[in-house]
Image: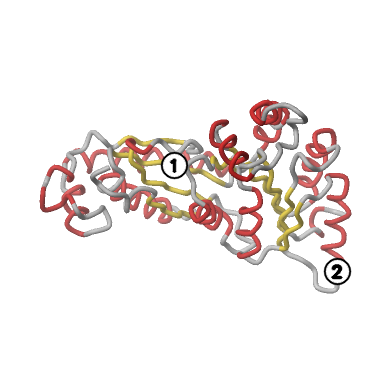
């Protein structure tokens, strides 16, 4: 069956055990995708054939595969590489998290790690991380869930996949954040805007966020802000054109200030609007804007 006959979007959801594959699968179901969980890699081609030749052909299918899938590590990468060539639009999403976070999640659920055998959970996590490295390297989108709530994970996935199936433009996710709460670990690029005057130190602006007009006007009124926007716009015009030419489909940009409420929020919105004006997809997420400014 030729590639042009396989008009279907296929997304493989994989990654480390405990990193959120089940929640990702639910998010895809909510977006209207046909989801198959715990699929043995050897059955990927069969599943694709059934989807294409059913009485109501499936246009979007998500396959969840993990370390429970028997001969996963021997067969999965080969099967996914074949799918990448065979279908009209293939993506691989890789979910990961810090070792400490994964250990806590397994302890809370009282589940045994699939690769731990009779050893400690951390041994299984480290063993799986090594074995999964080829998939990590081949992934189109990597999401670190260490600091993400279920809601935030679903938001990230909607930002990348809640579009028309025919739309293959590069999609950028812009995340504003506060350095005091940690850098988003899955960001492809990080822009530090802490060099700009901080509205936090102006009493009448402190309780507002960068989504409020008074804060936005203050931040955009700075000479340094104008220069930063001009140079970052030039940078992204070059980068996005290059990424698109190389076939890249996702880009995650983090914009950070001290608390993630003022400067980063304003400039993430500006950057998102500029990216959209260039004809690319853009979704802006404000990770820390609603956090208690006193923390």
Q: Is residue 226 left or right of residue 142?
A: left
Decide: is 218 above or below 189: below
The colour scheme applied to this rendered structure is secondary structure
The image quadrant where one finds the N terminus is bottom right
Q: Residue furthest bottom?
A: 55
**Position of residue 168 measured from the top left corner of the image (x, y, whole percent):** 61, 54
Q: Position of residue 266 (x, y in %)?
A: 28, 50
Q: Are marks 1 and 2 in contact (CB under 8 Å)?
A: no
Which one is in front, 158 or 182? Answer: 182
Image quarter (top left, top right, bottom left or bottom right) of the C terminus: top left
Question: Which one is nearer the viewer's eye here, 279 or 85?
Answer: 85
Q: Residue at x 56, y 54 (%)?
A: 157
Residue 204 at what x, y percent from top left? Answer: 11, 53
**Residue pointed to by mark 1:** 253
Image point (44%, 36%), residue name: 189
Determine whether, in the image, residue 161 is placed left or right of residue 220: right
Q: Residue furthest left?
A: 203
Q: Earlier in the sequence, mark 1 or mark 2?
A: 2
Q: Residues within 10 Å of mark 1 (few under 14, many from 20)?
A: many
Q: In the rendered picture of this protein, how many numbered marks are placed on residues?
A: 2
Image position of 101 (left or right of 129): left
Residue located at (89% from left, 54% from top)? 46
Cα separation between marks 1 and 2: 40 Å
- Mark 2: few, some, or many residues within 10 Å (few <14, many ≥20)? few
Where residue 272 sits in the image (x, y, percent)?
39, 52
> Looking at the image, which residue is at 61% across and 65% down?
30
Q: Is residue 180 left or right of residue 54?
A: left
Q: Which mark is residue 7?
A: none
- Determine the secondary structure under disc 2: loop
111 relative to 212, above or below: above
Q: Which residue is mark 2?
A: 54
In the structure shown, which secondary structural element does the residue marked by tag 1 occupy?
strand
């Amino acid at each position: 069956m030729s590639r042009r006959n396989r008009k279907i979007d296929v997304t493989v959801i994989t990654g480390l055990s405990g990193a959120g594959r089940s929640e990702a699968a639910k998010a895809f179901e909510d977006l209207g995708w046909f989801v198959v969980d715990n699929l043995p890699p050897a059955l990927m081609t069969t599943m694709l054939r059934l989807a294409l030749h059913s009485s109501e052909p499936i246009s979007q299918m998500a396959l969840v595969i993990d370390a429970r899938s028997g001969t996963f590590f021997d067969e999965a990468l080969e099967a996914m590489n074949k799918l990448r060539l065979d279908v009209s639009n293939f993506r691989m999403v890789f979910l990961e998290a810090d070792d400490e976070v994964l250990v806590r999640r397994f302890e809370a659920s009282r589940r045994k790690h699939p690769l731990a055998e009779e050893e400690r959970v951390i041994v299984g996590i480290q063993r799986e991380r090594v074995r999964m490295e080829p998939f990590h390297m081949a992934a189109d989108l990597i999401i670190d869930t260490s600091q993400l709530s279920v809601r935030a994970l679903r938001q990230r996935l909607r930002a990348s996949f809640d579009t028309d199936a025919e739309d293959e433009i590069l999609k950028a996710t812009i995340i504003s954040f506060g350095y005091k709460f940690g850098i988003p670990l899955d960001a492809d690029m990080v822009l530090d805007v802490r060099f700009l005057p901080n509205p936090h130190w102006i009493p009448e602006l402190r309780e507002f966020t960068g989504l409020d007009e008074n804060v936005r006007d203050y931040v955009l009124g700075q000479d340094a802000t104008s220069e930063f926007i001009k140079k970052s716009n030039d940078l992204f015009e070059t980068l996005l054109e290059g990424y698109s030419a190389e076939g890249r489909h996702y880009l995650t940009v983090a914009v950070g200030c001290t608390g993630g409420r003022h400067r980063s929020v304003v400039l993430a919105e500006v950057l998102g609007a500029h990216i959209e004006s260039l004809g690319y997809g853009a979704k802006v997420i404000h990770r820390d804007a609603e956090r208690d400014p006193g923390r």
